Amino acid sequence: MIEIRQKLCMLLLLLPAFIQAQQTTPLVNSTLDGVVVDAITKDPLAGATLQLEGVTHSTKSDGRGRFRFVTGQKFPYTIIVSYIGYKNKEVIANGSPLTIELEQDATGLSEVVVVGYTTQERRNIIGSVTKVDPAQTASIPVGGIDAQLQGKIPGVQISSNTGVPGESINIRLRGATSISSGNNPLFIVDGVFVNSNSLQTVNTGGKATSPIADINPSDIASVEVLKDAEATALYGSRGANGVIIITTKKGEYNQRPVIDLGVSQGWAKAAELWELTTGPEHALLVNEYNTNIGRPAPFRPVTEVISGVAGRGLPEEQQTYDRLGEAFRTGGLGDYNLSIRGGSSDTRYYLSGGYNRQESILRPISFDRASFKLNLDQKLADFLQVGSSNTFGRSYRNQGRAGDGPQGGILQAALHTPTYLSPYNENGQLVGRAGFDNLTLLLDNYDVNSTSLRYIGNVYAEAKLLKNLTFKSSFSLDYNNYDESEYWKSFLIAGAGVGTATSALTQSSSWINEQLLSYKTTIGGKHNLGALLGNTLQSNVAKRTSAAGQGFANDSFTLISSAASTTGSDFWDKYTLASFFARIDYGYDNRYLVDFSIRADGSSKFGSANPWGYFPAVGVAWRLKQEQFLQEVAFIDDLKLRASYGSTGSQSGIGSFAARGLWTGGASYQEKSGIAPLQLANPNLRWERTDQLNIGLDLSLFKGRLAVDFNVYDKYTRDGLLPLALGETTGFNSFTSNAVEVSNKGFELGINSINVRKAHFTWSTDFNIARNVNKIEKLATTLNYGSRDLIRFEEGYPMYSFWVYKQLYVDPQTGNAVYEDIDGNGQRTTADRQIHGDIWPDFFGGLANTFTYKQLDLAAFFNFSYGNNVYNHNRFFGESGGARDAARILFKNNLNRWQQPGDITDVPKSDGLNVNNYIDGGSRWLEDGSYLRLRNITLGYSLPQTAADRIKLSKLRLFLAANNLFTWTKYSGLDPEAAANSSENQVGIDLGTPPQPRSFQFGIQLTW
Amino acid sequence: MRVRYINMLAVSALISSACTDFLNVLPKTSIADDATIIDQQSAETAINGVYASYRSYFDVSYQTIGYLSGDNIEFTGSQSQIKEFIDHNVNAENSTIASAWSGIYVTINRANHVIDKVPALSNDAINATIKDRILGEAYFIRGLAYFDLARVWGGVPLITKPTAGPTDNVGVPRSTQAQAYAQALSDWELAEGLLPQTTDRRRGTQKTVWALKARYYLYHQQWQQAIDHATRLIDDQTNYQLVTPYNAWFANNAAATQEAVFELFHSTNEINGHYASWQPQERGGTRQWAPNNAFAQLVTNPGTGGGRSALVGVDNQGRWYGNLYYRTNGSDPSFVFRVAELYLVRAEAHAKLGRLENALDDLNAVRERAALDPLEGLATEDAVLLAIENERRLEFGLEAHRWFDLVRTGRAQTVLGITNANRLLLPLPAEQVLIDDALEQNTGY
């Protein structure tokens, strides 16, 4: 210890001397100019590190692969060249100029991967970690990196609930563990635990924004996904649903400034829209329904008056009005990014600005993001480095109610209004029909928008206390200022005849202070030992102030202050987390690897009795390739068996004060304040806990031409947090309790293959497939979610199962639907409603093929899901057999209804709503949601290096990209991924949701 | 070296003590259980909370049970649970049933907290008169809650102590219907002894209790008691009047008129969302349900409806809509008890006692206010009772009476064509029967 302190002091004292020393003029004995290129393609390699052997002098190759050494060394001397993804090479320099060819290290074994609080070489990883290169998905026009990653990571199921850019994404990593505690993975950006829950309060029909969309994907250097307990346990309470670590781009030391400019432009359009009946067809079905139930047909000659009601004209006299065409448009897409990065010997920087604009295919929704980024690292001395990472983003959204609910619902007005009804009344004025707004008036006067200002950043200092011991301290902040407002003119439904407005400002700030001590050493050449000790303190505060106004003098006034009556409210919430963690890893002879980690988390949410949770994990790996018997087998580059077991926790979905007994204010009467019991105390509340076993295999064959990554896992969650139903005679309907057990079992397989690798032509294939089996092992009472209780959680069944009346067939004689009569009482009652299908696919994954031919590159990426169900709730409304008459649209499919004895069809005769044939929760609308989608295809052309040099560029690439070009599915709706509601427990119901668009973009990427 | 160790120790000590503080985060928007009803001010806020929850279940959930189950309303929306009432085929999973049940027991728990804690407050903490009033109001609301439970479900668990933990007040078997009504009456009798004899149209007073007791005695065929209690208010002409014209008690933003015996306060801050289900789209509503054609014809017919035609309107597509609740800023009051009911209670009780003249006098008072000709020449008790029944159908057309009236008079099956007598009591919420083993479902569900 004394030595350390002395050394530290000495270093500090000597610091000025070092700086002084650097300023003296060096002696020049040789000048070497050279270039570093790929051995096969001869492409220049920018940013390769060149180190003179035996001295500290090093440099980097520039954007065109060139470097220069001006040194006191005399020729010949040895240069050690290293470059990520390539094998290191030692070159003897014996004169200038010099061309250095590097061979790709296709095995990726020395690739550096970010894992819990540290980095490791891929060869030494014990846990299940997938690394993704965001460049592969850069041309997918969605809001954030979360949506772009779909289909790229084995075992991670991502669905875009809607085609609206920047909206929330459903991410399930190895299934779902929690009913109420949240199933989203933890996102970490440069060490900052970022909020991924929407701050939106304005009602857009159950939809919500994605806060991850505030981050510009083009600033991201790499994405690592940690999946098993070994990898996630260090994140303890936050790791149960996996961890997604995002590392943003940094400059390099000794790198000349490199400027990147990317510009792309594109268009998005719906691939298809709903098929609706024409006016005459609609009238025909309505007449048929009325005839079936013995009422006069309403579409009869106008002159035919029955009980005082005139006819509406014969079916064939009806007009057809197209509203969908008015609501949907070709949306514009634009993405512009400029960045500069570089560094001197002790400073490195990355600076960027970006602007992204995406118009939704559904008017008037759009998403705009402007972002700015600065990453800076400074070496103060050999042992001390400080730095900062900063992301600023501003996301502006024109929002629209594209979900459920009639007030201001765009698809309600566009899709659900019958086609035969004119948008005009007899006086030629625009009027709403069927209980919905007039589409034209609605679209022209839509005024719902939000601005999210986001700062994500950290500052750190890292000191090398000893040769193998470093200490890092950092302070991180995720601050989000979310400002939203909505104005509804008096003539819109939501305007309630007088004009209404609401406005809310939410501030969410989360800071983390982190201390990290890490130690790494090699003893006797064979024993590798590492240790990590850390602690974090974290505080999260959310605060909202909102105001609402009603009754505006006229429609020109929109500020709440000018409303006749105004109300205000506010909200405050806070929770804190204190954590301590440690990890020891040991490797013997690069053959046997073992590690052990533990994290202790204290959360303010659990009250005083059980604040602490302890989450240990252990992992072992055996690199068989290092054994004698495999050393000789040339075609195997590496073979590693891995196993891990450990625990992670969760507390995310419960309220910040869930353990406490509370009374609330706000129960006022006669405008005098009132108080009332709000929740029952549960002093025994404790952490939800997930134990996970993972067994995996990494295999690399044929010099990295074929790599296989295979994992099987078994996760079991106990003490699952849930508002446990309580008999309501207590005056409460639930209390927060540890009452659920859920299991997830599955496998993941990733195969990367380089099929062809020649000088002018390469072809590689990446394929991944995964299966997860989810089951609720313990749940005291069943829980229903979603519209009409369509989603059911029941012990013994998967989460998100569908609860329906199973339609067996339509009786060809009577035309009536026949349902499975479970209790055999001859009647269709609630007892006949059953679990039938669920949202989980049997298999899902992705397939990417990448080709390069000379200057051309082509990438085609498919993703798929097989065996999942979707409830097409649009059809419940749109296939009502005419019983809804003028109140709803009719889908074309309704024309396939039973009409006469002998007809074989699954669409029964119309007998009214909720009578028998057209009932809530009928299985007729539960569909197979399997699909295969050509998600992205990109064709690029890079200018030959010589040509680029001529115009002083190091790189120029032009590209064309198409997204969602084809989708193969039996699903009859527009998009099998659609979900009407972004609430975690209501997935799999498609109602009034715009589909993901088909889009085309072209762009240019320039590097100086 | 020593210095460094001491530093580390100091740091770790700091961390462990700091951690306890760091993890102790107190809520700002709520208060802890044990610091609730401690003095006069907190007792006042607690009783306001009781009113707020009574209003919350009565406003829409409970009233819809009463009027949708009658024969005045038709279903125009898409949710089958609404239609179930109109079809008299209510499932145990019905969500309105579930929310009404839940809301009533929330109210009972709030009232129980006041009933349990307020008597214990010392005279230093609270003025004795105010203490009595607050306690009386809690008994008054709890009585309403049990009355409302009894007439929809029959016997129910009788909960009279506040819930302190998750094992309290569950597993309580159902009482009989008579016991549930008796609980209501006994609560009202306690309230009567504690409340002041003032006129307050938005809170419970002795007079409000008399009105409710009049209703109670009518339901229980204690005719003379019903007459006596109703008369106490009818005779209080300075405070209680049939206002004219008919719509004067609700139209033109009227509130707390002389017609009101008990009316629930609403404002732009304490919003009543009821209008949205009634009003047509062009007026900011969804028109989830609407007056049916038969009712609309009756109420707009000058011979039967008179001034009560104000209860309905016609939208821009020529469809009927209910217009009792129309204030899109949410300030519509909810009407629990009106003076008209006093007259019709007394009319019915008189008729049952064979005093047909008196009965017709009261009936015609209500008709006269609706600008209708008086009924004359009805010679039999049955004829008068039928006239009262029909008058009540229109007078309380969009209020929560029709179903309860037909059930209590035993006329529901005849008038509404219900073949299965079990349907006269509604099912307990299915989920509650599953959760609480002590709860037995009503027969036939």
Image (cartoon, grey):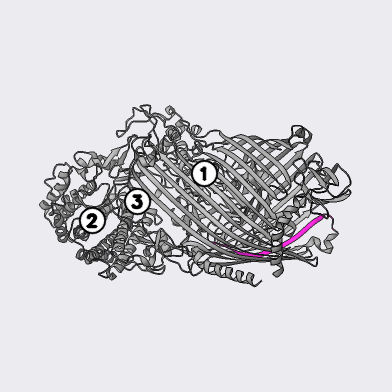
Element under label 2? loop
Q: Could you tell me if the residues under marks 1 and 2 are in contact, i.e. CB atoms within 8 Å?
A: no
Give the quadrant of the N terminus of chain A: bottom right
Residue in front for this viewpoint, A594 or A435: A594
Residue beneath the point at 53% across and 53% down = A836
Residue A215, relative to residue A689: is it above or below? Answer: above
Residue in front for this viewpoint, A33 or A615: A33
Query: Circle 1 marks a residue in which chain?
Result: A
Q: Which of marks 1 and 3 is in front?
A: 3
Residue beneath the point at 83% across and 42% down = A33
* Residue A746 shows in this picture: yes
The stretch of residues the image draws in magenta is: A633-650
Residue A760, relative to residue A113: is it above or below? Answer: above
What residue is disc 1 on?
Answer: A906
Compute the Cα span from label 1 to label 3.
30 Å
**Type of residue at label 1?**
Asp
Residue A354 appears left or right of B91: right
Compute the Cα span from label 1 to label 2.
47 Å
**Type of residue at label 3?**
Phe
Give residue B437's position: percent from left, percent from top. 41, 67
Element under label 3? helix
Compute the Cα span from label 3 to label 2.
19 Å
Residue A523 appears left or right of B143: right
